[in-house]
Image: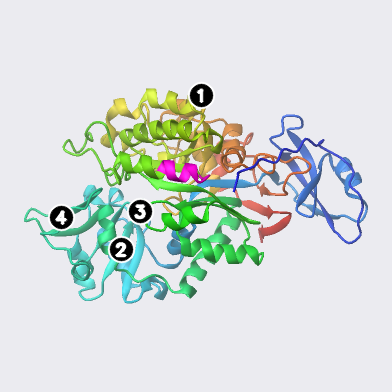
Amino acid sequence: MGVGVLALGLSCVRRVPEDARVETTVYVARRIRTLDEERPEARALAVRQGRLVAVGTEREVREAAGDSARVVDLGNAVVVPGLVDAHAHLSGLGLSLTVARLEGARSVDEAVQRLVSAPSMSFQGDWLVGKGWDQNGWPGSAFPGRAELDARFPSTPVYLTRVDHHAAWVNGEALRRSGITRDTPDPAGGRILRDAKGEPTGVLVDNAMDLVSRRVPPPTDEQLQARLSAALERCAQVGLTGVHDAGMDLRTFRLLQTWDIAGRLPVRVYAMADGQGEERHTYLELGPYGGRHLEMKAVKLLLDGALGSRGAAMHEPYSDAPGETGLLLMEPEELEARTWAFMERGFQVGVHAIGDRANTYVVDTLIRAAAATGTQALRHRVEHVQILRPEDIQKLGAAGLVASVQPTHATSDMGWAEARLGAKRLEGAYAWKSLKNAGAVLALGSDFPIENPDVLAGLYAARTRQDAAGRPQGGWRPEERLTGEEALEGFTVGPAWASFAEGRRGQLKVGMDADFTALSVDPVEDEARKLVDATVVATVVDGREVYRAP
């Protein structure tokens, strides 16, 4: 299946033929930010059959819509093109919303206490699962161990993923059922943490997680449906009209495909096939897919781990762990082979790269493979693009690759990132402005559920590089801040380009899809601080309100 682009050269306001059988709805707001250079602001827009049929002043739009049009007054709200999260995980968000949540736990004891009162949905078979722990927020910042879990759960296997999904904390029963002992070797691209006697501590990093996760029973059909429903509902509530799902398993894809055919998807999903496991062979056979609200034209590969668990692959050792340089989750030769295979099949290729060594490999591989396969037009992507050498920033930009970055990662990591990297490497870390200036297309996201799906928090972090309390004053490495308009474009125009939808979405112009978000603040002109307490007034997808504030 080829990837086409629909270009619409239509005027801002025009009269449409009246048809009594089809309702036209006019939305009026304090301001409408269209991101259309010809008419950047408006006061009203009209929607009919899922498309924008008029954008302009209230008078112009009412005349174009006709006397029979329904009018919705959004009051003091500011309407923007539909906000899209360009890197997220729906299954993970659904899991986070329905199982034991360890985000924000301030100690091992608090995390364990949350497990004691875990909801029934936290059990898959007789395994207790949970997610979100982060040792960086605990006293001493040390990794947890199995002993604390064994004391409360001596016979129930426990599997808990770290906040970044690149480490797992398990108990002795989980290790026993998985056959992991002091004699078990570290798998390629993974690490079993061990104590001074060589015994597994209960923490598994990156590919070592698979030794246990493959023993955990899969969720039931009812659990999967409940989790995905909860995730999609939350997306609509936070103002998202679309999500780029970064690495979807086949079972989830089939379920969403069924829902899409039945018209049950409230938001658009641009799915990236999971290219890491064995299901990649099935995806290669199927090829790219396009439905109504569900598309799969991309594949997601992972080359390294995360900075928080020191799995990000670095050229030089970590500043706070001189003997460690991170992990490659596959050999560069394997990355090249998979990249070629998916490019030749017509897939856009996106690769997770956090450390500077991983980013060097990924940028070079994408540029070389795209040239060899003639697929530069498929807009290949680097996911996270977190730490780069200056020369790789320039190389990525010159090649026109998509830089899929997550602003709230910077504000979550800024308290300890310099300890990991040192001052010199920090110059190329979370470098959004530098990437943009180099020519890369910025597609902003959250990486939820690793971060909160709240897109307003992403807009705030992109503009300020501060936490919600306004720290540090002036922002962390403020030279990499984005302007209000650049941040908004990163959640609208950028994701549209990255998913081949720039002719249909990302702006508010006549003829384009009626996807838009109404906010209580102006994300461009209002003081950035107002975004912290802002709310979503309405979320409209394909002309249908999928969320309206009570």
Give the foreground label among 4 and 3: 4
> Which residue, given by chain and number where applicable, does mark 3 sit on?
165
> Which residue, given by chain and number where applicable, does mark 1 sit on?
437
Give the vertical position of 105 relative to 362 (above or below).
Answer: below
- Mark 3 element type: loop
Give the mark nearer the N terminus: 3 vs 1. 3
Give the mark nearer the N terminus: 4 vs 2. 4
Q: Amino acid at mark 2?
A: Ser
For residue 123, what is the image quadrant? Answer: bottom left
Spot occupied by residue 511 in the image (x, y as percentages of width and height)? 78, 43
Mark 1 crowdedness (10 Å alpha carbons): few <14, some 14-19, many ≥20: few
In space, the residues marked 4 and 2 are separated at their CA atoms by 17 Å
Q: Amino acid at mark 3?
A: His
Give the mark nearer the N terminus: 3 vs 2. 3
Magenta span includes 226? no
Residue 514 in sight? yes
Q: Residue furthest left?
A: 197
> Which residue, given by chain and number where applicable, does mark 2 sit on?
213
In space, the residues marked 1 and 4 are separated at their CA atoms by 45 Å
In space, the residues marked 3 and 1 are separated at their CA atoms by 31 Å
Q: Which residues are magenta?
A: 339-347
Q: Amino acid at mark 1?
A: Asn
Spot occupied by residue 19 in the image (x, y as percentages of width and height)? 91, 56
- Mark 4 element type: loop
> Which residue, given by chain and number where applicable, does mark 4 sit on?
185
The label number, if any, that marks residue 535 in the structure image: none
Q: Amino acid at mark 4?
A: Pro
Magenta span includes 342? yes
Give the foreground label among 4 and 2: 4
Give 65 or 118, whichever is nearer the viewer. 65
